[in-house]
Amino acid sequence: MQGKLIKGIAGFYYVDVPAEGVYECKAKGIFRKDNTKPLVGDDVEIEITDAKDYEGNIVKLLPRKSVLIRPAVANIDQALLIFAVAKPEPNYNLLDRFLIMMRRQGLDCIICFNKTDIAGAEQCIRIREIYEKSGCSILFVSAARQEGIEKIKKALMSKTTAVAGPSGVGKSSLVNCLQEGTQMETGEISAKIERGRHTTRHSELIAISEGTYIMDTPGFSSLSLFDIGKEELKEFYPEFAPYEGECRFLTCAHIHEPDCGVKRALEENHIHKIRYANYTTFYGELKEKESAAKSTKKRGNRR
C-alpha cells in the first residue's frame, strides 16, 4: 500500500493513504541500517499491522523528486508566499528574501496578497507592478470575504506546496479556507496525533484534496540569505535578464559598473525600483559576509 508521509514525530510516522485514511507507522530497521531517515513529504510503501487502529510499518521509500534543507521535507513542488495588501503593509525586503530562499531550493513561487477587502484597487495595481516581471504567479484574495479561494485551490491542485509568510497577514485564515470541504476521514487519527507526546511543533503536510497537500510553516519576521554567492544573486532576479546583454562587462554586478544595461533599464522604469533596491541591499550583505569569512580564514592561517 502506498501513501504520503504527512508528519513524523517521536519515532512515529503518519502516512496518508488516498481513499483509506492516515496510518500511524514505524520505520523498519533497514532505514537505520542504511542511514536513511524518512522525511515529511516522502512517498512510501507501508505494510499494515493493525487495520482497525490504522497502524503499520514503512517498508520502502519511493524515489524523491526533491529535498529541501529548511525545513527538512521531500517532494515539495512549489511555494505559496502569503503577504497582506495592507495591515500590515507588505514587507518587500522580506518577500524578496523568501523568493530567493525558495528558488534557491528549486521551487516555483506563487505570491498571494491577502486582505483585498481593506485595500483599494490602486494599492493592488501598485503591488502587481512591482512583481509582474519577477517570474512568479500573483494572486489577490480576501480570506474574510472568501474571495479568490478557488484561484488558490486551482494553483495548488495535484501538487505539494510549502506555505510561508510573516505573522499577521491572515495566513492561518487562508489555510483554513483551503481545508474547507476536505473529504478525509481523519478524526480519530487526528486525536491520536495530538496525544501528549505529539504536541511539539513539527513540519506537517495537510491534505486539502486527494493528491493535493500544503505544508504550513511558522511566521517569519526576518530571513537571512544562505548558500548564495554575491555573483549568483542576479540569477534570482528574472527581470534583469533581458538587459544583461547590454552591459559593458560580462561579469557586471549591476551595482557600480559603467555602461550597465540593468541600471539603464532601471532609469527607464523597465525594472522596479523596489526590487532593485532590495537587490543592492542583499548584494551588500553577501559581500560583507564573504569579507568576514575571508578575514576569519586569514586569522586561522596565522595561528
Image (tube, helix red, strand yellow):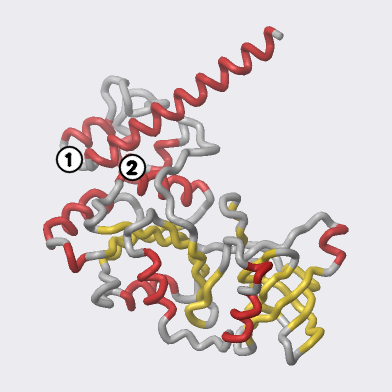
Q: Which residue position is annotated with label 2?
A: 93
Residue 149 relative to residue 107: left or right: left
Mark 1 Cα shell of 10 Å, populated few (<14), some (14-19), many (≥20) = few
Q: Label 2: how many residues lie within 10 Å, few (<14), some (14-19) or many (20+)?
A: some
| Percent x, y of residue 9 | 68, 65
Asked whether 160 or 197 is in front, the reply is 197
Judged from the image, the secondary structure of the residue bearing numbered disc 2 is: helix
Residue 38, position in %: x, y?
A: 72, 63
Measuring 62% from the left and 61% from the top, which residue is drawn there? 74
Q: Position of residue 238 (x, y in %)?
A: 36, 45
Give the position of the N terminus as an image quadrant. Answer: bottom right
Residue at the image position 67 percent from the left and 76 percent from the top: 15
Is tag 1's residue or tag 2's residue first in the polypeptide sequence?
Answer: 2
Disc assigned to residue 269? 1
The amino acid type found where label 2 is placed reads Asn
Q: Amino acid at mark 1?
A: Asn
Front residue of this view, candidates 189 and 63? 189
Q: Residue 107 in the image: x percent, y percent?
A: 49, 56
Whole-angstrom CA distance, mark 1 to mark 2, is 19 Å
Total count of labels: 2
